[in-house]
Amino acid sequence: MSATITTQPRSVAILRATSGGRRTWFDRVMRSLALLAAIACVIPLGAVLFFVTVRGIAAVNLDLLTKPARALGVGGGALSAILGTLQMVPLAALLAVPLGVLAGVYIHEYGSARSARAIRFAADVLVGVPSILIGIFVFTFLVLPFRQYNAFAGSVALAVIMAPVIMRTTEEVLKLVPGTLREASLALGVPRWRTTLAIVVRTALPGILTGIMLAVARAAGETAPLLFTALGSRLVNFGDFGKPMDALPMFIYVNARQPYELQNDQAWGAAFLLLVVVLTVNILVRLRSTRRRTP
Amino acid sequence: MRRPDPMLVETPSAPADEAAASTSSGAADPAMAPSESAPSPGSEHGAATEPSSGRLDIANLNVYYGTFRAIIDITLTIRPHAITAIIGPSGCGKSTFLRSLNRMHEVIPDARVEGSIKLDGIDVYDPAVDPVQLRRVVGMVFQRPNPFPTMSIYDNVVAGLRLTGRHRAAELDEVVERSLVRAALWDEVKDKLRSNGTSLSGGQQQRLCIARALAVNPEVILMDEPASALDPVATLRIEELMAELRKNYTIVIVTHNMQQASRISDQTAFFTMGDDRAGYLVEMDDTIQIFTNPRNQLTEDYVSGRFG
Amino acid sequence: MTTLPSAPWLARGTTGGSSDRTFRWATRLAALGVVAILLLLGVQLLDSSWLTWQTFGLGFITATTWDPVAAVYGALPYIVGTLLSSLIALVLATPVGILTAIYLSEIASPRLATPLTFMIELLAAIPSVVFGLWGVFVLAPFLRVTVEAWISSTLGFIPFFGGPTFGIGLFTAGVILAIMILPTIVSISREVIRSVPNTQREAMIALGATRWEVVSKAVLPFARSGIVGAIILGLGRALGETMAVTMVIGNGQAIPTHLFDQAQTIASKIATTFNEATVGIQTSSLIALGLILLVITIGLNIVARLLVWRVAGPVGGES
């Protein structure tokens, strides 16, 4: 029995042992593997940023920024692409923002739980539709009937990509507005629509803007939906949405496929410009939202 | 069964852990050599007749979460093979104290401990002690029943055993039956061991969780308000079960329910908290003393329902 | 706002009524607009490809010739190219993505997890065409002399892994796709893993499990269907990804039989030939390809979102 000689409690034997060598070892191995995986995720980011920066900066010069592509042969710059992006993306935002925000307001404020779920689901599915199909879709009713590629169709295609994203973020942000604010306003006799716009949407505005910025950044980088709509153009198109127009992503795509080093360099330069814009927006927006989340 | 059952083998000299089990004779294991110095100091309850395993000596224990000191300077002894109840107002650090006993609080980042907790003479915070091993000796049952929803009843019971290498099917069957019998659940589930653990009622789920804890054959079982999510009938079954389990295990239970503490426990520790929200031990004694003749006014007020 | 505080129903009766209704209708219209776009998209693609379905029937899907001169069209080479490149991407991205999600949510300290998460979100923000550019000029030449050379010299005896290596081809497309779907798999798996109740982890810890055992025995089984959903969402993205793949997959017109073959996915086939196609049966057939892709991606999306919802509830629609 217990009281006699060297009775070592069972617990002591277990505590003095380490958890079976194999298990500790396996635990360490798997944890290190997980760390390696996380590092592996970051390496491509570093590699892309590195090459785009190094090769891009070397290619960015005044010509790239101020000259259109030479109509024939090699040379010139990316001006038509830069101007094209600066025209098509804002128009796309102009189309998508009211649609997305109002739809977001609807599912948050008015929709029944069932209709909200259905609409949300449709938006999620739409986000998942390959963007090239959206290009074809817009082609079938804004290009084909007129037998004319045009920048307006390009903007519409980008808007179709942006709208569901804006809708979902709007809804997410509206959820964070305290219900008491709404009630206070309603109790003051403010009609519901004004309450919604002046109080609820107003309060959520920074968040909604964040969503819009991210959607704009995403649209600015899209190529596939523009291929069969805006088509791309070597000419500067300023303001004529009925004609083809270039955009930075298309400029990159086209020039990357040419056999001339100068054009390839221009692709890198344009990629650098595009990446600076897209990543700046993303970094600013995400830094702000993480700072808001942490306290 | 590789691991000796305390019910059958009262002298736990046989090696219990798998590392020792790989050598055919545990007595030769050098890891056991220092064990003679193990008997705990200052043991007023340490009579020779008492079981030698499952005794906890806590000295000057402080637990911090970051800069917040959750419990202050707790010194007490938990008797082996008895039920020790921890009572006190909510937020007084009962759960933190309980979790510090098997180092469960370490899951929270920035948690830190000062002082010592000795289990059968071994400081569980000794760097040489692996918390993973510690938790096999000091098991735990939680407030809400938490069976693994993707496992059958059978698999739930042996989940802990399966962590330590391969076991023969017959061996597992035996452990499942014995654990479920001990958890007073066998008769209710023996015909549906393969069905999902979450198909049981709340009380049955909690007994399943107790069986799961018993299956790895611990010395100490920590219970964090194990019946607070259960109805009275299920609660009664858990209490009866605990009375049964105390023959073989040291049980520490945190409870809000003072009547429960007075019904089931052998000794009771009363915690409360100071102005800085840090919990401390007011007094600890045999349960009958605490509830009938406490030494401290705070305890008296608490057990008699006075406050303010 | 300047009126006296009054009960809401008073206000609704007077000033608010009609504008309230207008506003509500405007929002409803917008919401229905989003749904309508999706429905129209399907209808338009079906309508515009009707000629092809009429001419070739469902045999279009299994036919292997794409010959504008003979006006005979078949989708199989591109379907195979799409599935193979996505499969390669999944094989590479799934273990890395899940392990990363585990690392970020279960192992890393917040101090490390936050910047890592941030960087992976940035990876998702890089435009596809930039990946393509990098793929053509950096990744493809690199893979050709390293990984591809190694695979073909060590595993070359297996027919699928043999053959000449070009850099540009199926394998490089798979690698690029893997990189591009990693953020999707990581972020959604992470959401799902974080939604596993802590009681499950504690139960396993209390049984004496190591950190990894907690993950593999308690967390992953609980989160399993959601993680499968995350992988399927990644697959959906890989199947439809266009620009980067177009730029690195080559222009193979036959069904690929080797890992390093040049090939064509549905999306890349459309991207490279749509503008040159003559309106009629050729355009119609390209749109029919698009319809096949649409059906596959929407189907996968629905399945994936249902799986994720089952574990984590609705997760944000982004990425």
Image (spheres, helix red, strand yellow):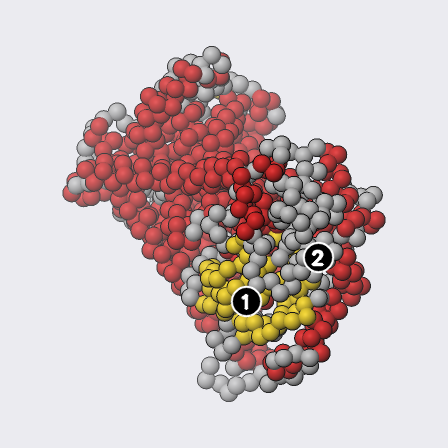
Distance between mark 2 and mark 1 Cα atoms: 24 Å
Q: Nearer the viewer, mark 2 or mark 1?
A: 2
Query: Residue furthest toward the bottom?
Result: C4
Q: Amino acid at mark 2?
A: Thr
Report the side of B210 relative to B191 (left or right).
left
Q: What residue do we see at 45% from left, 20% from top?
A: C259
Q: What residue do we see at 69% from left, 46% from top?
A: B11
**Mark 2 Cα shell of 10 Å, populated few (<14), some (14-19), many (≥20):** few
Local SS, label 1: strand
Q: Is residue A192 above or below residue C144?
A: below
Q: What residue do we see at 61% from left, 80% from top?
A: B296
Query: Residue furthest toward the top?
Result: C157
Report the side of B224 relative to C261 (left or right).
right
What percent of the width, then of the height, locates residue B137?
Answer: 61, 50
Mark 2 or mark 1, which has the lower sequence index?
Answer: 2
Read off the residue under disc 1.
B75
Q: Is residue C198 above or below residue C23?
A: above
What percent of the width, then of the height, locates residue A254?
Answer: 31, 32
Read off the residue under disc 2.
B49
**Mark 1 Cα shell of 10 Å, populated few (<14), some (14-19), many (≥20):** some
The chain holding disc 2 is B
Position of the N terminus of chain B, as image quadrant, is top right
Residue B16 visible within the image: yes
